Image: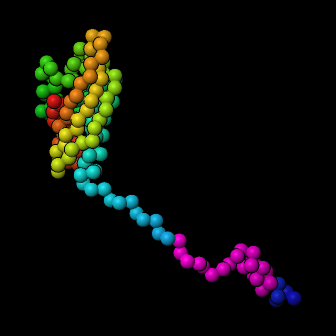
Amino acid sequence: MSRMFPAVTLLLLLVACGDKPAGPAAPAVPAAPATSPTEEGAVGARAAVEAYFVAAKKPDEAAMLALGTAEFQAKEKSWKKAFTPNIVQKGVALKTYEIRDPEVEKDAATVSVRALFTVDGKDKGEGMNFALVRRDGRWWITEIR
């Protein structure tokens, strides 16, 4: 009887575990479509502009300027009508903004933004375009018009 015990135990385990022949395999889940370089560029360009507005809400001039090229930084620091110093130094308060879909062509992008500011206690809507360039895999602001 001792020789039969292991065989019976094995048989009971197989029945209990439901060891059955494998059925048809589950259908494969299709992989997500790969994004195109243009779509990836749009995401990156949008993220750079979003980071600029997050810094503008604080306002954090150093963070705003750090998102741009050296030429952008020099212009924003010296031009009286530049957007960055008006937000930080002249007390123009950013209330809300809407970033539109970027237009990307290779390593250049334009991102349109609609923003609402408070200037001297009054709300003022403003449209602006951010020009960006991709260098070393990162998007840099080159101009705000």
Horizontal arrangement in the rendering, residue 78 relative to residue 37 (left or right):
left
Residue 58 vs residue 94, the one in the foreground: 94
Colour convention of the picture: rainbow
Q: Give the farthest residue toward the right.
A: 1
- Write the start and end of the magenta stretch as one range: 7-26
Q: How many marks?
A: 0
- Asked whether residue 11 appears in the rendered view, the answer is yes
Q: Is residue 2 above or below residue 85?
A: below
Give how far across and how far down residue 71 sits, in percent: 12, 33
The residue lying at 46 percent from left, 65 percent from top is: 29
- At 26% across and 46% down in the image, what residue appears? 42
Tell me which residue sits at (24%, 42%) in the image.
102
Magenta span has 17? yes
- As drawn, the residue found furthest toward the top would be 120
Give residue 125's quadrant in the image.
top left
The stretch drawn in magenta includes residue 89: no
- In this view, 51 is above or below 86: below
